[in-house]
Image (cartoon, helix red, strand yellow):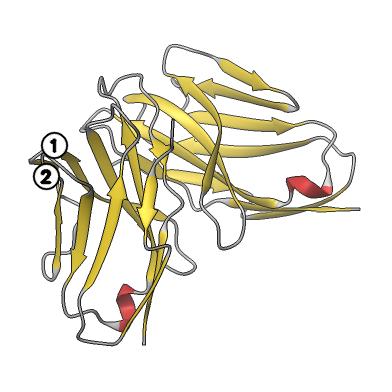
Amino acid sequence: NAGVMQNPRHLVRRRGQEARLRCSPMKGHSHVYWYRQLPEEGLKFMVYLQKENIIDESGMPKERFSAEFPKEGPSILRIQQVVRGDSAAYFCASFRGEISYNEQFFGPGTRLTVL
Amino acid sequence: KQEVTQIPAALSVPEGENLVLNCSFTDSAIYNLQWFRQDPGKGLTSLLLIQSSQREQTSGRLNASLDKSSGRSTLYIAASQPGDSATYLCAVRDNQGGKLIFGQGTELSVKP
């Protein structure tokens, strides 16, 4: 049973380009969280998605960032017109459901570098 | 608004020493608390998960306690080894949507 998968593991973009980060949850998991770890900062929540629904996007920057979790395929975190300040490690975590006791399992992260 | 604080920010100990890492949180309305390990440039490794109804969890040389009413958790590492060197993160799962709220971490260095 494969764990949470993220790709690419490393992504380099120039300012103004788009970045697409993918997260495939564990088998049987229909809930995904995205977190961001800026250099020298802690991990911060960005968005919580279930299949085809955004449940909580209170941690997402208001502009340039979007996320989706389609019925089929991985969850996508999309960053348009990247800036240097977007350079960070982006982690996703999945869980089965029943928020109150189920553990979130983390992927290895995507490290985004904006030149 | 939930805030998680970890003390100390950094800790250096000689090999073999027992040590305690501290975590405090401001809102006791949590589902659970989790301790992670993160090596430089790497992802998160889950160490221990304590449900809100539990007082402690143990795994090998690690023991984590939870006092929800006082908003505190400790991670006890027995007989530390150089391989334990890493950043240790504490996170609480809030009951408003279930997101994890992380502390800033404690950077542990165990000297041989």
Amino acid at pointer 2: Pro
Tag 1 residue: A51
Which label belongs to residue A70?
2
Number of residue marks? 2
Q: Position of residue A1 (x, y in %)?
A: 44, 30
A103 in relation to A46, above or below? above
Q: Is residue A88 above or below residue B58?
A: below
Between discs 1 and 2, the one toward the N terminus: 1
Residue at image x 43%, y 11%?
B53
Amino acid at circle 1: Lys
- The chain under label 1 reads A
Label 1, label 2: how far apart the Cα atoms are: 6 Å
Q: Quadrant of the N terminus of chain B?
A: top left
What residue do we see at 20% from left, 86% from top? A16
Depth check, front residue: A12 or B47: A12
Assign a secondary structure to mark 1.
loop
Query: Is B57 drawn above or below residue B15 in the view shown?
Result: above
Other-residue count near label 2 (Cα within 10 Å), few / some / many at <14 / 14–19 / ≥20: some
Residue beneath the point at 37% across and 63% down:
A8
Q: Position of residue A9 (x, y in %)?
A: 43, 62
| Label 1 in the same subunit as label 2 | yes
Check disc 1: other Cα within 10 Å, few if <14, some if 14-19, many if 20+.
Answer: some
Chain letter of disc 2? A
B85 to the left or right of A31:
right
SS at mark 2?
Answer: loop
Please give the name of the residue rendered at 8% of the width and 40% of the height, measured from the top-left corner: A52
